[in-house]
Amino acid sequence: MAEIAEGGGGGHDKGKKRAKKSSTRVDMTPMVDLAFLLLTFFVLTSTFSKPKVMSLVYPAKPDPAQEIEPQKINNAITFLLSEDKIFYYSGQYYPVNAPGPKGATVLEETDFSAKGIRKLLADRNSFVLQGKEGLDKKLKGKQIQDSSYLRMLIDFKKDPESLKVLIKTDDKATCKNFIDLIDELKIAEIGVIAPVDILASELDLINQKIK
């Protein structure tokens, strides 16, 4: 309990009467109780920031006893990261010793410039981006609710026409390039992102490109 005491003056002049000053006592207990009540209120009503994460699809590991064959992938693009280089190829991978209908796979190089990865992803994933643009207009016009907006956007990303992305890295790839690539995929509204192991023949193609 806090107190504020005020006493009288020191000396007294003869023949003069002064008003006697009484001690002032202020009880601060209610203020302390109020402070704790406010603190409890703000703690219970506050919303803690939630960490923003991005879901990645990790494929199941194959049985080591079985022979690994390249899987058929429709409407997909594979990025290969090595050092500060970013290579990619579209569709299914065909090694030199087993070429496809159009021959063996050839790597293309890109970067994080305005005409690089962002434009590439925007062109290849235009189906989802155009669908999202239409949903944004409906949401802004209050034609759909937030829950319907998210559900319909997920359906766009799961559609067979949407772009799928595979990411492969060698032991020289930088963490910065990997994170920057993930950010670009998020901007392009890529729904399926799968980090997978790089093949030995793909490493050979990277080494030939770097040389």
Image (tube, grey):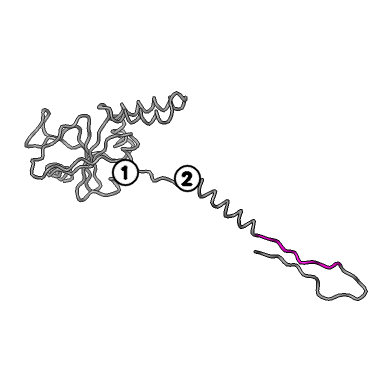
Q: Secondary structure at mark 2?
A: loop
Q: Position of residue 86 (x, y in %)?
A: 24, 42
In front here: 47 or 128? 47
Q: Position of residue 181 (x, y in %)?
A: 29, 41
- Residue bearing mark 2: 47
Q: Secondary structure at mark 1?
A: helix
- Residue bearing mark 1: 180
- Chief secondary structure of the magenta span? loop
Where residue 90 sits, quadrant-wise, is top left
> Which residue is depicted at the point 90% across and 70% down?
17
Q: Position of residue 204 (x, y in %)?
A: 13, 44
The segment highlighted magenta reads: 19-28
Q: Amino acid at mark 1?
A: Asp
Where residue 123 sits, quadrant-wise, is top left
Q: Residues within 10 Å of mark 2 (few under 14, many from 20)?
A: few
Q: Is residue 128 above or below residue 82?
A: above
Is residue 123 found left or right of 172 in the rendered image? Answer: right
Q: Residues within 10 Å of mark 1 (few under 14, many from 20)?
A: few
In front here: 61 or 176? 61
